[in-house]
Image (cartoon, rainbow, N blue to C red):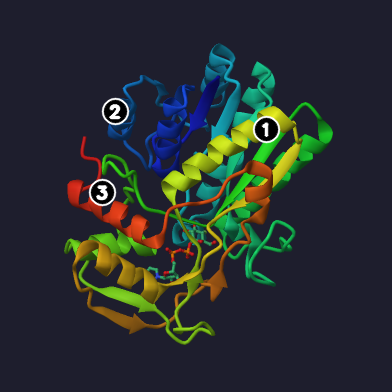
Amino acid sequence: MKALLTGGAGYIGSHTAVALLAEGFEVTIVDNLANSSRVAVNRIESLTGRNTVFHEVSLLDASAITAILCDEVPDVVIHFAGLKSVAESVDHPLDYYRTNVAGTLNLLDAMVASGVRSLVFSSSATVYGEPVRLPIDETSPITDAANPYGRTKLHIERMLQDLGAADPDWNIALLRYFNPVGAHESGEIGEDPNGIPNNLLPYVCQFAVGKQDRLVVFGNDYPTPDGTCLRDYVHVTDLASGHLAALRFLNDEKPGVACFNLGTGKASSVIEVIHAFERASGLALAYDIGPRRSGDVPASYTNPDKARLQLGWTAVKTLDDICQDAWRWQCRNPDGYVA
Ligand code: UFG
């Protein structure tokens, strides 16, 4: 089986590439390296002892992506490529619509041209916006996302649902990730954010090694047990195995378009994450309590039943595993992937 991964050099893509290669898949990576590194591809290959085919190409280059698809004709495409900063999407919405929505459209045109009809899409729990009930399951209403980044995920999901409705040959899994965190247990691949990290765990890692001066908890007056926001932190290697489960499901069940939440079902507060990180690193982290961050919802965590029952997938890594692996990655790669 051959899988083509857009964004395969990025955070979740690289971990999924390792899992696919370990299972015997042939892997082609298409990545423009805008928010990722060629070094990650080298590490994927050295970790697995397998080669990949790598194309440094943007999905905005429609003719290049069509040529690659028509040449490679993979069995499945796993589509990770896209911009992912909420704050940046508010300031530069057109960049987000162009890269995420128009890039996906080019990819779908290329899939049509090459006859490839099997797709796994990296969606996000952000499509649920402010959840109307908890835990969030796949029947929870999708109303409107809170920011342009989230709306691009929503538009792409709808585009894929329309495509599946128009042509029954398509089989598509929409994977709605909760909070992806952690790193490969080898410490060789992990998250390498551009600039100051927006997300909690990468920020805590950089604070712990002295790359950030101050750790601020954004609000402790939420209606939660300790007053800080609750999230469902899911280890990136668990997410990678979720993609393999989705591929098997598409292949075996030919479901048309199906969506799955990928999370643990456990809710952890910001303070609990900081304490878990302190246990993993042996460091004491002095943090301040600051104001709420605009756009944060008090709580977001999944009901993981659908993925468990239909994909046979359950996240197995704990918050302690997550922090240990994130810390190992940070210590071994204090400056991320340095070419
Ligand atoms: N937080 C802090 N201090 C920090 C960084 C984060 O207290 O320095 C808090 C946030 O306020 C939030 C929690 O840590 O309560 C988690 O924040 P993240 O930024 O790590 O994660 P989010 O839940 O905000 O973001 C995730 C995904 C996004 C997605 C978003 C909305 O990472 O891609 O959910 O669903 F868009």
**Residue 209 horizontal side relative to residue 301, left or right:** left
Q: Which residue is mark 2?
A: 42
Report crowding for label 3: few under 14, some 14 to 19, many 20 or more residues within 10 A (C-alpha): many
Q: Amino acid at mark 2?
A: Asn
Is residue 68 or residue 251 the one in the foreground? 251
- The quarter in which the C terminus is drawn is top left
Report crowding for label 1: few under 14, some 14 to 19, many 20 or more residues within 10 A (C-alpha): many
Q: Residue at x 70, y 56 (%)?
A: 138
C-alpha separation, residue under disc 3 versus residue under disc 1:
33 Å
Q: Residue at x 74, y 40 (%)?
A: 257
Report crowding for label 2: few under 14, some 14 to 19, many 20 or more residues within 10 A (C-alpha): few
Mark 3 residue element: helix
Q: Amino acid at mark 1?
A: Leu
Q: Which residue is mark 3?
A: 329
Q: Which residue is mark 1?
A: 250
**Residue 34 horizontal side relative to residue 259, left or right:** left
The mark nearer the N terminus, 1 or 2, is: 2
- When the figure is inspected, residue 306 is found, relative to residue 30, above or below; the finding is below
Using the rendered view, name the quadrant where residue 248 is placed: top right
**Residue 316: x %, y % from top left:** 47, 52
The mark nearer the N terminus, 2 or 3, is: 2
**Residue 219: x %, y % from top left:** 42, 82
C-alpha separation, residue under disc 2 versus residue under disc 3:
16 Å
The mark nearer the N terminus, 3 or 1, is: 1
**Residue 6: x %, y % from top left:** 50, 32
Is residue 303 or residue 117 the one in the foreground? 303
Q: Nearer the viewer, mark 2 or mark 3?
A: 3
Instruction: State yes or no: Cβ of the residue under disc 2 lies below 8 Å from any atom of ligand 1.
Output: no
- Image marks 2 and 3: residues in contact by CB distance under 8 Å: no
